[in-house]
Amino acid sequence: MSLDKKEDIQTLALDFLSVAQQAAIASYPWVGKGKKNEADGAGTEAMRTRMNTIGMEGTIVIGEGELDEAPMLYIGERVGTGAGPSVDIAVDPVEGTTLMSKGQDNSLTVIAVAERGHLLNAPDMYMKKMAAGPKAKGRIDIEAPLTDNILAVADALGKDVSEVTVMIQDRDRHQPLIQEVFKAGAKVKLFSDGDVTGAIATAIEELDVDLLVGTGGAPEGVISAAALRSLGGDFQAQLVCQSNEEFKRCVAMGMSDPGKILRMDDLVKSDQCFFVATGITDGILLNGVRKKSGGALFTHSFITVGGKGSYFQFIETRH
C-alpha cells in the first residue's frame, strides 16, 4: 500500500507525533544526569514500542545502528502492525545526546518518514551539508564557494549581505567557513551540537537563520533533508569518506559513486513525506519537556507535511 493520499499522510504524521512525544518523555528523566546511553536507550525503547502499534509496514533506514550493534531500531528492522502504507523511517531518539546529558539546550527527538524506497539509506559517517529555506530554493550550490552562496541567498531573500545569518557548528574543521562568512560581511550563528534544528531554522523566518553549512553526521543530514523537503526548502550534501572501509560500505549500500553531489531528489525522492520533532530540552525551535505540579507533563512539538499545501505546526500537549 502506497502513501499517496494527503489524508493518509496527515493521519500517519499524527501517529508519529505521538511516537516523538513518548520518546522525549522517556528521555526526560535523564536530562543533566551525564548518562547519554541510558537516555538514548529509554527514548529508543519508547519509540519502538509506540511505532509497533501503528497501522503500517515500516522499515528503519536510519536508526540506532546495525543489527549486531543495537538491540532496538536497527537499520533494516520492520516496525508497525504490517497492515497499512509501506514507508521508510529515519529516527534519532535523542538528537544532541551530549547536550541532553549536560542539561544544555537544543536536544530533541526527531523522526522523518517517506514512501518506501524514497529515503537515502545513509551510512553513519560524515556528510558535507548546505540548507536554505523556501525563498532561496534553487539558489544554493554546494559546489560553489560559500561567498557565492551567501550572495545568492541575500538576493533571494531581498537582504543586504550584512543581514544574512549563516549557521555553522562550532568545530575547528569549520574555521575556514567561519572566516569566509566574516570576509563576505555576513553574520555567523554558531551552535555546539545538533544540526537538524539549524537546517529547519532556515525555513522559519522568525528564527533568523538564512543558511546552514558545515560537515556533520550523514544520518542527521537525511532527516534534515526530509524536513526541508516538507517545508519547501532546499538541501544539498556530499558524503565524506575518510577511509577505504567507509568507501566500501557506501558501495555495499548501493551508492555507485559515494562522492557524488546529493541534491534533494537524491536524499528524499518524494514529496510524500513528513517530519516530526519533540523538544527534550529548551532550544531555538522547541521548548523542552516540562513537569508541572501534580505530575502532569507538557511537550512541545513541531510537525511538517510535504506535498501540495505543505505546512508546519507547533503543538503543545498535556500528558
Image (spheres, helix red, strand yellow):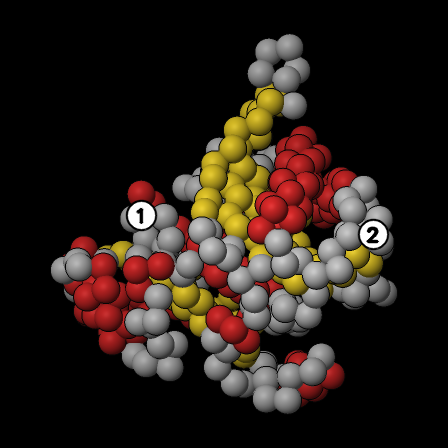
Locate residue 34 relative to residue 165 in the image: left or right: right
Q: Residue 267: name its quadrant.
A: bottom right
Mark number displayed over residue 156: none
Locate residue 106 relative to residue 8 in the image: left or right: left
Q: Which residue is mark 2?
A: 83
Identify the residue at image location x=63%, y=67%.
119
Closer mark to the observer between disc 1 and disc 2: 2
Identify the residue at image location x=59%, y=89%.
257
**Residue 50 in view of the camera:** yes
Identify the residue at image location x=78%, y=52%.
84
| Front residue of this view, candidates 295 and 29 | 295
| Front residue of this view, candidates 139 and 164 | 139
Q: Position of residue 46 (x, y in %)?
A: 76, 40
Locate residue 58 relative to residue 106 in the image: left or right: right
Locate residue 136 relative to residue 120 in the image: left or right: left
- Which amino acid is tagged 2? Ala
- Which amino acid is tagged 1? Glu
Q: Which residue is mark 1?
A: 205
Label 2: element kind: loop
